[in-house]
Amino acid sequence: ETPTRDIPQSIQIVPQEVLEDQQVVRLEEALSNVSGVTFGGEATGRSITFGLRGFNDAPVLRDGFVRYGSQSIPEISNIDRVEVLKGPASILYGEIQPGGLINLVSKEPLSEPFYEAELQLGNQSFIRPRIDISGPLTSDRSLLYRLNAAYQTSDSYRGFTQDNQRLSIAPTLAWRIGDRADLTVSLEYTDSKRAADNGLPVIGRRVADVPRDRVSSDPDDAIETQDFNVGYKFEYRFSDKWKLRNAFRYASYNFDFNVIGLQELGFNEETGTTDLFWASQDSQNKNYTLQTNIVGNFATGSVQHTLIFGADIAYSDVRTFTVGDFETPAPVNIFNPVYRPIPKPDEDTLALFSETNVKTYRYGFYVQDQISIFDNLKLLAGIRYDTAEQRNDSGEESETTQNYADFTPRIGIVY
């Protein structure tokens, strides 16, 4: 609850009005409004990446919660605004790239009845109906609800036979527990099935000179993803000056890259031929995060302070399992492809390519003081202590463990 001008950091916000005016349906469209952000593309439809101030893999937070492992492709229908904080942000969020972070703020329940329905149509058979309804559930408006739901289907501009389909539903309940306490419980589920696009191969330093709709793997390749988020946030106000905030979030992201066609593994630049193989990759990413902090406002003489101190605990479990039939390649020429469907083998008979299980335990403790020396002179100072343990199991008793612990200081001034 601090004006952005008083924070010694560059913060840019894409508000709901801009998202509506631009008819945004993908996060990269919203972030095209923000300088210093680079869209890194989608990894075969499995995850999405962004660069921020030259640093790759900028984290995409949801309501202040960091997600570890692959970052799913976010659904925009339940987003109120997009916040981009540029520069170091580890003092409050722990393990963050120095380039900054992207935070998606979810829509909140409204105290007045609100009903909205929308239908978007576009080229490539794009169809996207969406609803957003909210209002009170009780006469005293102590219990509020909001429901966002969207369905999207479209063709790919490449020659895939698989349509892109996406379904999302996000209910939220807010309970005003008297004058001092509030509790909000939210859930979001997104199910997606889309073409698994490997992109086009590169010859030398240029993309191969082929039609834009050319498929370099197999037109039937597809990927299925499921994203599930559930959690709560609780706030208790001791007085007008001091309050306690506690929040928990469980996030699960699974993808099934069990292609019904062929999977690209290599490319011969001289002949334009790529050897394609059957392959299947499954991954389950689970994140558990608990945050607690106390925020207080007080004065020492004429100097005003906003003090925050708290702790967060996070546990992530990322499992990836890859198998394939790498003994019977099916060559395809990118300039004159002849796709040769072959019977899909039993996954249990495929050779193991890799198996990983990474478990990480993170604990963070921080304190920060926003000091208003004068109306036009602000000082920010804080420090954080992090400790983490990561266990990496690649199978066959090859588990390794790494431990980290360090302090992160922060100081800034605004005039």
Image (tube, rainbow, N blue to C red):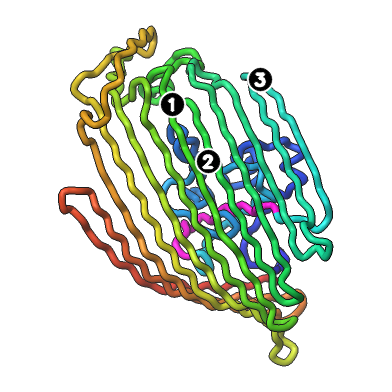
- Residue 206 visible in the picture: no
Q: Amino acid at mark 2?
A: Ile
Residue, disc 1: 222
x then y, percent, for residue 44: 43, 32
Quadrant of residue 198 within the rendered picture:
top left
Q: Which residues are magenta?
A: 94-107
Q: Amino acid at mark 3?
A: Asn
Q: Residue 340 bears which disc, if any? A: none
Q: Nearer the viewer, residue 349 or 9?
A: 349
Q: Residue 73 bears which disc, if any? A: 2
322 sits to left or right of 1: left
Q: Amino acid at mark 1?
A: Ala
Q: Quadrant of the N terminus?
A: bottom right
180 sits to left or right of 201: right
35 sits to left or right of 302: left
Quick one: label 3 or label 1, which is nearer the N terminus?
3
Residue farthest to the left? 396
Q: Is residue 102 magenta?
A: yes
Q: Nearer the viewer, residue 359 or 29?
A: 359
